[in-house]
Image: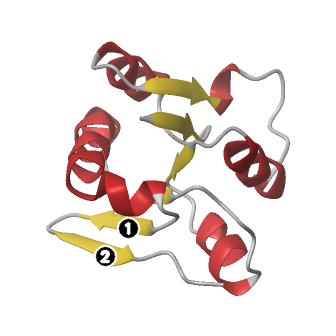
Amino acid sequence: MRLLLDTCLSGKAATVLRDIGHDVVWVGDWPADPGDAAILAWARDENRILVTLDKDFGELAVVRGEPHCGIVRLVDCSVTRQAAVCELVLARHGESLVAGGIVTAEPGRLRIRPATED
């Protein structure tokens, strides 16, 4: 899958996800962080699922109606588990994400918000 990992995720997670076959761009490799709105727009323009720890992206997508190509938010996820949890979410809910869904992964719980019809 095509992913954009926010700077709050580890570079190690980006490497692991690349190694298992995903097309991953990590914002931490960019020269500067352009801000949440620009990151979300870039992910959309590049047809990438955004993976983040930051709840502000959900607000941009849900409250403000900003278009996106799927968002995964990891909550209380240690650096060492980020890639594994992300891969689990993609395996179980990749189709929903590609359709524009939002998945919040918390320890012991996944919340799925399907894409809304316009």
Reply above or below: 113 against 92.
Answer: below
> In this picture, is 46 found above or below 49?
above
SS label for mark 1? strand
Q: Quadrant of residue 82?
A: top left
Residue 48 left/right relative to 63: left
Is residue 73 visible in the rendered image? The answer is no
Q: Nearer the viewer, residue 8 or 115?
A: 115
| Horizontal arrangement in the rendering, residue 109 relative to residue 65 (left or right) | left
Identify which residue is drawn at 59% across, 72% down: 58
Read off the residue under disc 1.
104
Q: Residue at x 66, y 73 (%)?
A: 61
Q: Amino acid at mark 2?
A: Arg
Residue tagged 2: 111
| Numbered marks: total | 2
Q: Position of residue 113 (x, y in %)?
A: 41, 78
Q: Earlier in the sequence, mark 2 or mark 1?
A: 1
Graded by Cα atoms within 10 Å as few (under 14), some (14 to 19) or many (20 or more), the crowding at tag 1 reads many
